[in-house]
Image: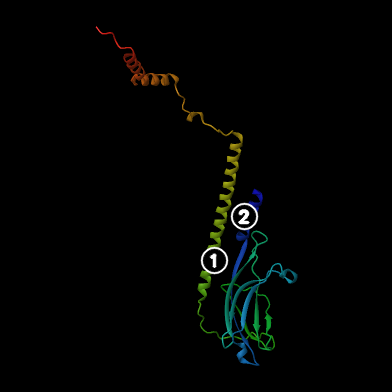
Amino acid sequence: MLFTYIFVVLLLFTARVFATNKCVWVRGAVLCQKDASKQFNVEIRVYDRDGYKIFQAIDPDDLMGVTFTEPDGTFQLDGCGSDFNWFPGVPNNPDPYIQIRHYCNSAKGETLELPEFNTFVPKTHDVGIIVLDSNRTPNAPVTFPTINKPRHKLAESGEKREGEQLTQMSLFRLLFFFTLNHLLIKEDISKKNSSSPSLLWDSSSIELSDSDSNENKTSSYEERLPNLTKKKQRYETKEFFPADAD
């Protein structure tokens, strides 16, 4: 049981330590030539690909971020993801890709998936203009409005997240050493208790009575007690056997 608990703690600890965290900045625009209103409020998602094909059910892709397009079809998105490092010292970067859900061609909706990219912060991944009618990307330049969220805030949030991960790592270390120390002390105490017999009665707490002192107490009590028996006998003698008159 002890080894199982230690193994679980070590597994959680290594999962936090040996992981590469990366963030992405994505921008672009969508264009629906049939109906310009269909290019507004289009859902844009960025995923980190983890499992391929049959492994998707076991290890689904992680959502890094989501946003919706403006009335002119432009969008800007940021998000972060992390992947486990299988070999120490060799970073395993996330595999981000963009997924677009729109209703340009049919009322049932379609999902357009773009190829993976490896552009991470502080660089920006620009996908250009995506024509939803033909599912192709002309990579034309896009003019973006001033964003509400400055880019440096995302960098600060990334640093904060790394600091939180370091704090979690420290907590895992403290938990591991505290648990191990507690179990070792518990085993040491149980060994000591099994080796030394337990005392059911402590002889030092027993008060021994002295027979001589009890006798002295009894004699002194008898001396203080009036001799009522002798007085009663004298009274009876005077009553039934009066003294002779002179």
Residue in the foreground of this view, choosing between 106 and 163: 106
In the rendered image, the vertical position of residue 72 relative to residue 85, given as above or below: below
Question: At 37% from the left edge and 21% from the top edge, which residue is drawn?
Answer: 221
Instruction: Name which residue type carries label 1.
Output: Arg
Earlier in the chain: of badge 1 and badge 2, it is: 2
Q: How far apart are marks 1 and 2 (CA)?
A: 22 Å
Q: Which residue in the structure is indicated by mark 2?
A: 9
In the rendered image, the vertical position of residue 91 relative to residue 238, given as above or below: below
Helix, strand or loop status at disc 2: helix
Please name which of the two marks, 1 or 2, marks the residue nearer to the observer: 2
Instruction: Name which residue type carries label 2.
Output: Val
Apparent side of residue 120 relative to residue 211 in the rendered image (left or right): right
Mark 1: few/some/many CA within 10 Å (<14, 14-19, 20+):
some
Apparent side of residue 149 relative to residue 138 in the rendered image (left or right): left
Helix, strand or loop status at disc 1: helix
Question: At 62% from the left edge and 58% from the top edge, which residue is drawn?
Answer: 12
Task: Indicate the quadrant where residue 71 lies.
Answer: bottom right
Return the x and y of residue 45 as percentages of the image width and height.
Answer: 62, 77
In the rendered image, the vertical position of residue 244 relative to residue 36, given as above or below: above
Check residue 138 in the rendering and tell me which mark sits there, or answer none.
none
Q: Which residue in the structure is indicated by mark 1?
A: 161
